[in-house]
Amino acid sequence: MKIRSKTRSLVNGRELPSGMNRRSMLALSFAAAISPCSLLFDYDAAEAETSHGSTEGQGLAVPRELVRRIKAITNVFEVGSPEADYSYIEDLGDGRGYTATQYGLCSNEPELARVIELHARSTPETQLMRYLPSLPPRGSGTDMKKLSGFVDAWQREARGRPSLAQACETVADDLYFTPAMSAAHDMQVASPVGQSIFYDTILQHGGGNDPDSFWSILDRAQDISDHPGPFSESRFLEAFLDVRRSVLMNPANVATTDVWRASVARVDALANLLKRNPALLLPILVESTDVRIALTWA
């Protein structure tokens, strides 16, 4: 069974670009910061950021605890910790304006404006509303003079207003989690580790049509694993990770080559989970040459 380009459009018809962004920049900086040493600490989800409930829609239902585990694993790769980092915001100098949170939401796209609008429904007095004219679709989102004070305002509200974190989760779920779970459902990928692999891939590679995107990786993996006989999920996921590893090592977008090659270890960590803990039973050991973090739930 194959799913093709008909599934490639994301929510609101927006396709995520593949390229050098916070996700790829963090891959390089995190690998450099901890290599060759490894980290080991326990993560108690009960003490983590507010967990958002089961994701439902399009005939899908992902239990709250599994959502938490999947996102925690990817947070390890994105910010070096299982915990979400909603207060992170930085101009990476990549032409995308400001990049915010573990999800890499960029100010040159409509996503940050949508976060602010959702946040304002619960917090109408938010100071972030005054920046909406400078963000897409009304502004470029890259004019730093017009965005003066935005970083301080974002960090202040991220630390003191839970509604901003909730808004970030809602937008990120639309962009990443829901499309990943929908693709997993269509591909009959039912294992927790398979769902985690799909989510982590679409978040790093984006959901566009470019050769480095999630959907291109999925197409190639289907071509490799397509053969007569019953569908083998584990064999398909192994092929998927092999293709993803090759994309990270030799991306079509050469601007990402150095940073994406530095992030190959996250594929190794997911491959280890596929072999050793496909059900993502606790404790979950996220382990590669770059990181060793045990996720535990109280």
Image (cartoon, grey):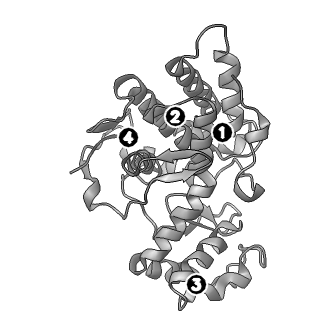
Q: CA distance from mark 2 to mark 1?
A: 15 Å
Q: Judge from the rendering whether residue 216 lies leftward or rightward of residue 23; answer left or right.
A: right
Regarding mark 3 in the picture, which secondary structure is present there? helix
Q: Residue at x 36, y 45 (%)?
A: 34
**In the image, which disc is placed on residue 187?**
none
Q: Earlier in the sequence, mark 4 or mark 1?
A: 4
Q: Which residue is mark 3?
A: 128
Q: Amino acid at mark 2?
A: Val
Q: Earlier in the sequence, mark 3 or mark 2?
A: 3
Q: Residue at x 68, y 48 (%)?
A: 19
Q: Which residue is mark 2?
A: 264
Q: Earlier in the sequence, mark 4 or mark 3?
A: 4
Residue mark closest to the camera, 2 vs 1 = 1
Q: Which residue is mark 4?
A: 35
Q: Position of residue 80 (x, y in %)?
A: 39, 51
Q: Which residue is mark 1?
A: 214
Q: Earlier in the sequence, mark 3 or mark 1?
A: 3
- Which residue is at the front of the view, 102 or 230? 230
Q: Judge from the rendering whether residue 39 lies leftward or rightward of residue 53; answer left or right.
A: left
Regarding mark 4 in the picture, which secondary structure is present there? loop
